[in-house]
Amino acid sequence: MIPWLAALPALANPANFASLSLAPGFGPGTGQVNGYVRGAIALHQAVGARDVRSNLCLGYGSPSPDHLLVLKRDFSRLKLQVKSQKQDTTLLIKGPGKELYCLDDSDQGKDAGWIANHLKAGTYQVWVGSFEKGQQFRYTLTAQEL
């Protein structure tokens, strides 16, 4: 092996779809990406059974993250919202400190959402899942600064 290559940090699993790279005050259209759920595996197998609040990690999706959310600076308050065509979605987020957040229904109905306070800068891995195994559908993931 090439010595300088061994000194590089190991790369995380790449995301299945586009990433979001955001700084406070990001403009309209910047905080939106699209993806496709392929409800293949139980997501708790990929990320863990329970999150930092002891919520169960539900849903079916891909073993690798669907998106990376790169926060260039700390955020006071940020909302992530899944928008599908009336599907029942889940949202799993693993932060840079390996903290895990598992979410299901939101104020938008059966589409999962997350409102977080005091987010630290860094890279967050994001999985969008289907509540039922084997479902396949398109979705939009939107970030909004609150």
Image (spheres, rainbow, N blue to C red):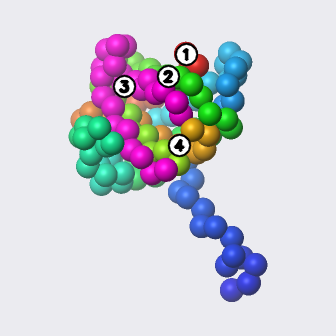
Name above or below for residue 57 compared with residue 25. Answer: below
Name the image quarter holding residue 50. Answer: top left
Mark 1, other Cα within 10 Å: few <14 / some 14–19 / many ≥20: few
Q: Can the viewer see residue 1 in this picture?
A: yes
Residue contact at pointers 4 and 2, CB within 8 angstroms: no
Residue contact at pointers 2 and 1, CB within 8 angstroms: yes
Residue type, label 2: Lys
Q: Can the viewer see residue 135 in this picture?
A: no
Q: Which residue corresponds to mark 1?
A: 146
Residue 106 magenta-drawn?
yes
Name the N-terminal-most of marks 4 and 3: 3
Residue type, label 1: Leu
Q: In 3D space, how far apart are the residues under numbered discs 4 and 2 (Cα atoms)?
A: 13 Å
Name the N-terminal-most of marks 2 and 3: 2
Name the image quarter holding residue 17. Answer: top right
* Residue shown at the point (25%, 37%) measured from the top left: 55
Q: Which residue corresponds to mark 4?
A: 124
Q: What residue range appears in magenta?
A: 97-119
Residue type, label 4: Tyr
Residue type, label 3: Ala
- Mark in the foreground, 1 or 3: 1
- Mark in the foreground, 1 or 4: 1
* Residue shown at the point (69%, 70%) measured from the top left: 8
Name the N-terminal-most of marks 1 and 4: 4
Name the image quarter holding residue 129. Answer: top left
Q: Which residue corresponds to mark 3?
A: 112
Q: Which residue corresponds to mark 2?
A: 79
